[in-house]
Image (cartoon, rainbow, N blue to C red):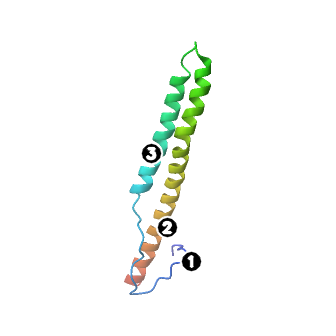
């Protein structure tokens, strides 16, 4: 039998668990994280491409990291947590459905 969270107490005839097993939000979070990271890399390359102004690379990199890195990290974490929660919900719903059928 599938492992379910200890907080879930399934009962025959009970209501289904109130959670979402949709992967839409975690996928979008992951895409936002990747986009922010890609923007950081692309803009860093632009800032560092001027050989006449090497200080521009240092200034540009610090600013870009401050702007793009926090959203990339936060959305990346949100994506991982979202996938975990959706997987857990799917497992619980599967167990609940099996209990309702009696298998």
Q: Residue at x 46, y 69 (%)?
A: 89
Q: Nearer the viewer, residue 49 or 10?
A: 49
* Disc 2 to disc 3, C-alpha distance: 23 Å
Residue position marked by numbered label 2 in the rendering: 88
Q: Residue at x 52, y 34 (%)?
A: 40
Q: Secondary structure at mark 2?
A: helix
Marking on residue 39 = none
Query: CB atoms at circles 1 and 3 under 8 Å apart?
Result: no
Q: Position of residue 14 (x, y in %)?
A: 40, 85
Q: The C terminus appears in which quarter of the rendering?
A: bottom left
Residue position marked by numbered label 1 in the rendering: 6
Please, is residue 8 above or below residue 65 in the view? below
Q: On the image, which quarter does residue 12 sit in? A: bottom left
Q: Secondary structure at mark 1?
A: loop
Residue position marked by numbered label 3 in the rendering: 32
The mark that comes first in sequence, 2 or 3, is 3
Nearest to the eye among marks 2 and 3: give it. Answer: 3
* Disc 1 to disc 3, C-alpha distance: 32 Å
């Amino acid at each position: 039998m599938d492992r379910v969270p200890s907080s879930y107490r399934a009962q025959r005839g009970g209501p289904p668990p109130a959670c979402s097993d949709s992967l839409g939000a975690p996928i979008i979070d992951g895409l936002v994280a990747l986009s922010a990271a890609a923007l950081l890399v692309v803009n860093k390359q632009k800032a560092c491409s001027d050989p006449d102004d090497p200080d521009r690379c240092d200034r540009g990199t610090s600013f870009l990291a401050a702007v793009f890195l926090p959203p990339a990290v936060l959305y990346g974490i949100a994506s991982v947590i979202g996938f975990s929660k959706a997987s857990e919900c799917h497992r619980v719903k599967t167990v609940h459905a099996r209990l309702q059928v009696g298998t």
